[in-house]
Image: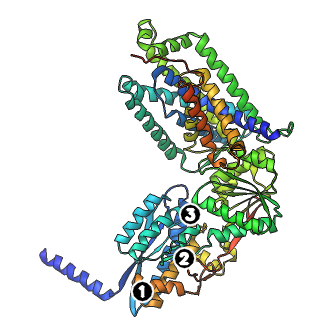
């Protein structure tokens, strides 16, 4: 009996020596439970796929074969849970992070990763503050809200012909930030902001502020917030007989928005999304096919950005010839490679260069890219 | 002027929903001195069980007329809430009737969480669209004021229900028993009133009103989800305090007043404060009014001076 145990132990050692490869842990964080869990799972799949492909190619870093191990965590879109799982990943000695999804979780978590010296690349957080905290290892592969707000403001004035703009936001970091940037851009493009109103991210009644807006008679109404408010807001616009054009950011650019708006949505409704539509991404066709084959699911929003983010980590490690975060983080800044979503290269702060924004119009029952 | 009138309509609509919910709070408080924080969640259960019924009916009888469907949905939602109200009282609050005041209060908060969590498990976390069986397309505007058939239905239904409730309390035997129990339930029971049954009845009636309020709320906004009862519940509780908790007329007045204050507050706070405050402070406006009323009339608008019960 004793002999068998020893024999197995020796066999085990033999196997591990024979492999002689370094295991590199990469953490992935997104909300995997809750009402945006479908987006979180999509994000996680993107990073997982990139690392599996890197393993299949048998990548060598600094002359040694490495094996990437993906550790997925659920932050429940909650800032407190976000920092807890961030600490857990740091304790597990991960070498890099792909995540988080929400700006509200990415920002507090980034401090923990920064203290541990681990780089993080978010494929989804768009709040400008995220990359403005002065952390060397913070990057994102998606356009930020300054870029998005500017695009919305310009689009409203130039394409929708807004002379008088009304702005509503939900007082969250995301909604307020996006509304401020939109206001700035619209004013710069020559529009007048005739009303600036506020609501909250758990409100359902907007009649009072919409009535006030109606009195100001705007051509275009912008809403900075999520689909759960945007949908009912569209219904109430119709009930109050307001026919101004309506535009909102990525928070309202979802199938859910269409469902919740019921008969309140029409071709006067627009929304914007950071990034380009899947069909226009350079590497989309092949990516979609591999994604479908691996996960038997459709790409939602963030998986291509997560795929590029995970690849950015791998490529920076290869360039540095090391998996040590202190050594390879500077290399992330120097990257310039063709990703699925476009060319991946970061500016000094860590924002993606040339982050694109696409505006969609509601047409024939769905969002269609303009 | 048309903005003013429109804000009036907005305020009355939301105010009458608050009033219906506030009645449930105030009836229970009047009789037991208990603030039933789970009452707001009955609004949610009412809306979601009506939604479930409508989905079922649309499946089995797609050609059914909208009014019949809405009536059937209400006929399911109301008993569901009534049974729930009865069960809550029987299982949780009755055992604590002689416990220190904090115990039933904490239990009520716990009940609220319990109901929300169960609803979350049953109906999921996402927002549901609520079929708008009464049209939400505005009628021909009168003097620039838009009103929808569903808003008219809400105003009429809640007015009728309030009148019926007042008749129930002031003109019937059950109502007399309720008033007697509220006055002093030991003495009432000595006089032959079955106070347990009366208290259960109060919960049941309040729950039925909450179910109606839930269906009205969801029909007006076209959405329903497991957390939808929280805000109207809180607002209705405020309304009940504003009107004088324990007083039926007060709950109605408080509800309507709160709806109007909110609506006018959001609409005019910026002009009234010369641009210093804006609509993100609309709730502050409501609470300033509440504060002022309570400073000058601690028992609320219609509350009577009550001596402490021994």
Numbered mark located on residue A186 in the image: none
Q: Which residue is nearer to you in this view: B78 or A199?
A: A199
Q: Return the residue at label 1.
A: A327
Between the C-alphas of marks 2 and 1, the distance is 22 Å
Task: Find residue A49 and report its horizontal and vertical position in percent.
Answer: 51, 76
Label 2 environment density (alpha carbons within 10 Å; few <14, some 14–19, many ≥20) = many
Between the C-alphas of marks 3 and 1, the distance is 32 Å
The reply to whether discs 3 and 1 touch (Cβ–Cβ < 8 Å) is no
The reply to whether discs 2 and 1 touch (Cβ–Cβ < 8 Å) is no
Residue at 52% across / 18% down in the picture?
A: B305
Tag nearer the camera, 3 or 1 = 1
Q: Return the residue at label 2.
A: A307
Q: Quadrant of the N terminus of chain B?
A: top right
Q: Which residue is nearer to you in this view: B36 or A298?
A: B36
User: Are discs 2 and 1 both within one chain?
Assistant: yes
Task: Find residue A336 and report its horizontal and vertical position in percent.
Answer: 58, 87
The chain letter under disc 1 is A
The chain letter under disc 3 is A
Q: Left or right of B29: which side holds B251?
A: right
Among numbered discs 2 and 1, the one appearing first in the sequence: 2
Local SS, label 3: helix
Q: Is residue B126 above or below residue B116?
A: below
Label 1 environment density (alpha carbons within 10 Å; few <14, some 14–19, many ≥20) = some
Among numbered discs 3 and 1, the one appearing first in the sequence: 3
Residue at 64% across / 50% down in the picture?
A: A199
Among numbered discs 2 and 3, the one appearing first in the sequence: 3
């Amino acid at each position: 009996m004793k002999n068998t145990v020893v024999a197995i132990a020796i066999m085990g050692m033999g196997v591990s020596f024979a492999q002689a490869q370094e295991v590199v842990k990469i953490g992935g964080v997104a909300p995997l439970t809750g009402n945006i869990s479908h987006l979180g799972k999509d994000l996680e799949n993107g990073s997982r796929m990139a690392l599996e492909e890197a393993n299949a190619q048998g990548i060598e870093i600094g002359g040694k074969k490495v094996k990437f191990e993906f550790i997925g965590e659920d932050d429940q879109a909650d800032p407190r849970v976000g920092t807890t799982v961030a600490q857990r990943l740091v304790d597990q000695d991960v070498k890099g992070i792909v995540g988080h999804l929400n700006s509200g979780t990415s920002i507090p978590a980034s401090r923990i990763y920064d203290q541990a010296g681990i780089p993080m690349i978010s494929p989804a957080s768009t709040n400008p503050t995220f990359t403005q905290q002065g952390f060397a290892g913070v990057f994102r592969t998606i356009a930020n809200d300054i870029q998005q707000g500017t695009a919305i403001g310009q689009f409203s004035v130039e394409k929708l012909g807004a002379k008088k703009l009304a702005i509503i936001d939900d007082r969250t970091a995301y909604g307020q930030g996006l509304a401020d940037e939109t206001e700035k851009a619209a004013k710069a493009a020559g529009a007048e902001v005739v009303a600036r109103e506020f609501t909250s991210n758990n409100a359902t009644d907007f009649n009072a502020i919409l009535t006030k807006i109606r009195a100001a008679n705007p051509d275009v109404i912008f809403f900075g917030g999520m689909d759960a408010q945007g949908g009912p807001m569209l219904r109430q616009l119709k009930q109050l007989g307001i026919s101004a054009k309506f535009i909102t950011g990525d928070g309202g650019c979802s199938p859910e928005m269409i469902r919740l708006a019921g008969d309140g949505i029409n071709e006067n409704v627009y929304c914007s999304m950071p990034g380009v539509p899947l069909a226009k991404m350079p590497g989309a066709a092949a990516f979609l096919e591999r994604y479908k084959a691996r996960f038997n699911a459709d790409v939602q929003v963030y998986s291509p950005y997560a795929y590029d983010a995970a690849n950015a980590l791998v490529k920076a490690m290869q360039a540095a010839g090391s998996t040590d975060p202190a050594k390879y983080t500077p290399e992330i800044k120097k990257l310039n490679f063709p990703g699925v979503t476009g060319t991946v290269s970061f500016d000094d702060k860590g924002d993606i260069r040339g982050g694109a924004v696409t505006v969609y119009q509601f047409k024939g029952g769905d969002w269609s890219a303009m | 002027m048309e903005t003013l009138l429109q804000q009036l309509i907005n305020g009355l609509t939301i105010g009458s929903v608050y009033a219906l919910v506030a009645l449930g709070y105030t009836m229970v408080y009047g009789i037991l001195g208990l603030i039933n924080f789970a009452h707001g969640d009955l609004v949610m259960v009412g809306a979601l069980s009506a939604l479930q019924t409508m989905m079922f009916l649309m499946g089995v009888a797609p050609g059914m007329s909208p009014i019949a469907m809405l009536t059937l949905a209400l006929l399911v939602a109301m008993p569901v809430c009534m049974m729930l109200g009865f069960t809550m009282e029987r299982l949780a609050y009755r055992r604590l009737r002689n416990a220190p005041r904090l115990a039933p209060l904490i239990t009520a908060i716990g009940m609220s969480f319990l109901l929300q969590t169960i609803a979350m498990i049953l109906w999921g976390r996402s927002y549901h669209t609520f079929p708008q069986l009464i049209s939400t397309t505005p009628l021909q505007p009168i003097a620039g004021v838009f009103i929808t058939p569903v808003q008219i239905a809400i105003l009429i239904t809640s007015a009728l229900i309030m009148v019926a409730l007042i008749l129930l309390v002031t003109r019937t035997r059950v109502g007399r028993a309720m008033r007697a129990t509220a006055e002093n339930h030991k003495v009432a029971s000595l006089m032959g009133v079955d106070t347990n049954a009366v208290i259960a009845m109060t919960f049941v009636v309040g729950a039925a009103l909450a179910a109606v309020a839930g269906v009205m709320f969801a029909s007006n906004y076209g959405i329903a989800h497991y957390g939808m009862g929280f805000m109207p519940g809180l607002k209705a509780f405020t309304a009940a305090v504003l009107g004088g908790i324990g007083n039926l007329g007060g709950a109605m007045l408080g509800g309507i007043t709160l709806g109007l204050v909110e609506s006018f507050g959001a609409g005019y706070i910026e002009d009234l404060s010369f641009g210093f405050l804006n609509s993100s402070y609309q709730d502050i406006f409501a609470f300033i009014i509440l504060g002022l009323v309570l400073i000058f009339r601690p028992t609320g608008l219609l509350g009577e001076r009550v001596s402490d019960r021994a």
